[in-house]
């Protein structure tokens, strides 16, 4: 098996990803990651000369968002009519922080 990644590489990746790895796991991870990289070797054998990289599977999409347009909506009264509690034109919800009660 080819040594693509060293323990130093794996420690750097783990630090970047904020994953704590004990020394015994680093050694196993080096073996596992190198095996994974080796398993991808057949991909390098394809002749890709002249093949353009694909950055999106559908191709030349530039903007898939619709225009932001105003549309009729609920009135404030309609939005609040089924609220169990309301106050000053707003939903009144139970507090999840602090002393409790409604906010």
Image (cartoon, grey):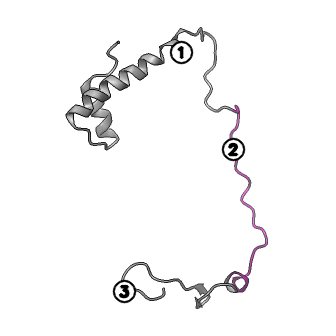
Magenta part mainly helix, strand or loop? loop
Residue 59 included in the magenta stretch of the image: yes
Gap in angstroms between the C-alphas marked 3 and 2: 47 Å
**Residue picked out by circle 3:** 99
Locate residue 92: give its quadrant: bottom right
Residue 47 percent location from the top left of the image: 59, 8
Precedes in sequence: disc 3 or disc 2: 2
What residue is drawn where x is 60% and y is 22%? 53
Q: Secondary structure at mark 1?
A: helix
For this rendering, which residue is in front, 22 or 47? Answer: 22
Residue 84 percent location from the top left of the image: 61, 87
Q: Residues within 10 Å of mark 2 (few under 14, many from 20)?
A: few
Vertical position of residue 45 compared to residue 24: above or below: above
Residue 63 is labelled as: 2
Residue 7 percent location from the top left of the image: 25, 26
Vertical position of residue 81 compared to residue 60: above or below: below
Q: Secondary structure at mark 3?
A: loop
Which residues are drawn in magenta?
Answer: 58-79
Locate residue 63: give its quadrant: top right
Mark 1 and mark 2 residues within 8 Å of each other at the beta carbon: no
Disc nearest the viewer among 1 and 2:
1
Locate residue 31: give its quadrant: top left
């Amino acid at each position: 098996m080819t040594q693509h990644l060293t323990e130093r590489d794996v420690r750097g990746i783990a630090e970047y990803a904020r994953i704590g790895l004990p020394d015994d796991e680093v050694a196993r991870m080096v073996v596992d990651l190198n095996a994974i990289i080796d398993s991808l070797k057949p991909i390098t054998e394809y002749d890709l000369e002249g093949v353009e990289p694909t950055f999106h599977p559908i191709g030349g999409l530039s903007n898939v968002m619709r225009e932001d347009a105003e549309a009729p909506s609920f009135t404030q009264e309609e939005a609040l009519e089924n609220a169990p509690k309301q106050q000053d034109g707003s939903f009144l919800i139970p507090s999840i922080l602090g002393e409790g009660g409604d906010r």
